[in-house]
Amino acid sequence: MGETILEVSHLSVCRGGQPVVEDVSFALSAETDTALVGPNGAGKSTLVQALLGLIPRQGGSVRLLGQELGPRGQLPVAVRDQIAYLPQLFAPTGPLPLTVAEFVALGGVPWRQRRQAVARALALCGCQGLERRLLSELSAGQLKRVLLAFCVVRPRRVLVLDEAQAGLDAQAAEQFHNLLFDLRRSQGWTILQVSHDLDMVRRSCDRVLCLNRRLRCQGAPAQALTPPQLERLYGKGFVPYAHHHHSVQP
Amino acid sequence: MSAQSAPLLLLLGLPFMQRALLAGLLSGALGGLLGSVAVLRQLSFFSDALGHSALLGITLGVLLGLDPTLVLVPFAVLFALLVNALVQRSRLSADALLNIIYSSSLAIAVLVLSRFPRAGGGLQQLLFGDILGVSWLDLGLMAAMLVVTVFGLVLNRRAQILLCVDEPLARSRGIAADRQRLLFVVALAVVVALSIKAVGVLLISAFVVIPASAARLLARSFSGYQLLASGLGALGAVLGLLASAAFNLPSGPSVVLVQLLGFLLAVLVSACGRSGPAATAGWPGRDG
């Protein structure tokens, strides 16, 4: 068991006065890839936003990289800089006069090193040649890769993805997944990703957390994603959708 | 020298016209600069609401016998803070709430002014602006505000851009979105209050929205976008004022009309650019 990167204890979150996440506890070890699955409205996005301090929590505690998350979501800058977040609905509306290079540089690099750091991040994410393109001109797949470049422009230890493959066609989703897999290995990231793609979760995640307001089960995908567990999580008659992948990484 | 340009040159030599041109330059640049952020953060309706509600502040000043400029700045800031707090807490959509607030403020102000005919005598100037009545004090305040705005935008550049792109992403990077919004709204309120005399209650939002929207269509980088919005705002204001002086037209509407022409030109250029090769460039990635 490696170093504990994230420790969530009895976390509860309400939205509009209604409990959305209740009494959730789990921990993530270093350099593991953990999926958070569950039906729509199960509180997955709320949970990841609460543990990053983006929305207030009603109870419980969160420790990220050994630091307690403050009551109003405060984290020391040095800790926050090591965590990257890819939001669910990242798509600029209307013309956005911001180049890919300008955007990636905002990931947090000193002004003097920005050209080198941006070029390196774009190369890592397969986005060479996009530097001068506007963010609003990119396809959904390109946008996701550029967002990853925004994350890798400086060293991070934790990556939190909220349905990163949403809005991508099967091929683009597979390409993004493969890129993520490569980067996770080369960068030594600890990943927590919200996903509906149970096939991908089975193939590449070390652990899975099954959430439906409360944590229903957790463990290795082979143990946690059995038909009886899935029926308990998603309801009776649930048939998991099988994604067809063009290339499968080990 | 044509018969029309001779009186125009004479006019340019007059102090009130020089002040008017300077006011146009400053309010146009300020409007464009703040508009560049307001348009992307979908706060342009906020400037409209602030402008319309400013009439209530002016009414208060007139009733209290005070200089409207002195009343208007604190009124606009307080009003902006109040509206911002309401928008944050209300379950209604921001545009519906802003519409209710600004139309009610406008109605109250016009009703009050109608009860005091002497005070409301200059209603047309209040609604459409009287750029020729701008004083050196107004100009000094506008210049100071331009410096503060540029400084504030440079200092908070990363935060403001990320908030324009995606608020959850910005917050995940530790940016205090609420504080940034508050700072921006206060700056917008001050600029609206300072520009009201020159531009008028009804037209102020055009100064914020039109140059920024034109620049949004043309710019190929964020820095270029802000410079272009500011430049188009200033240029439109100066050209509009010159046209107003040359053809004896009201100043505020003349400026807005010039800005509109600039916007239409930007739409045309942008539409031509979209059909060019850049729009169809492929994905050069390794596996795409």
Image: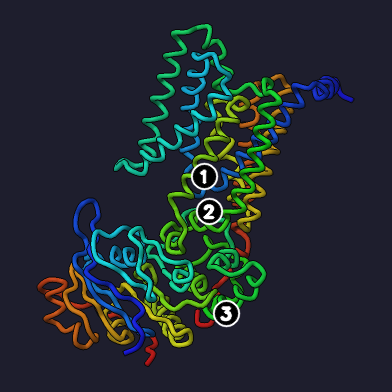
Query: Which mark, residue B160?
Result: 2
Q: Secondary structure at mark 3?
A: helix
What residue occupies the far right of the structure in this picture? B1
Query: Which mark, residue B184?
Result: 1
In the displayed structure, A191 sits above or below A185; it is above
Chain letter of the residue carrying label 2: B
Q: Nearer the viewer, residue B34 or A164?
A: B34
Asked if residue A41 shows in the view, the reply is no
For this view, does B60 lie left or right of residue B255?
Answer: left
User: Residue A36's quadrant in the figure?
Assistant: bottom left
Q: Residue at x 15, y 73 (%)?
A: A233
Q: Residue at x 52, y 35 (%)?
A: B189
Discs 3/2, front: 2
What residue occupies the far bottom of the structure in this picture? A250
In the displayed structure, B71 sits above or below B89; it is above
Q: Residue at x 67, y 20 (%)?
A: B133
Measure how far apart labels 2 and 1 are at the Cα level.
9 Å
Q: Secondary structure at mark 2?
A: helix
Chain letter of the residue carrying label 1: B
To which residue does mark 3 refer? Answer: A123
x, y percent for residue A181: 41, 84
In the displayed structure, B275 sits above or below A236; it is above
Q: Residue at x 14, y 82 (%)?
A: A227
Same chain for the residues under marks 3 and 2 in the image: no
Three-letter residue code for mark 3: Ala
Callout 1 crowding tier (Cα within 10 Å): few <14, some 14–19, many ≥20:
many
Three-letter residue code for mark 1: Phe
In the displayed structure, B35 sits above or below A139; it is above
For this view, does B156 lie left or right of residue A64?
Answer: right
Measure how far apart labels 1 and 3 are at the Cα level.
36 Å
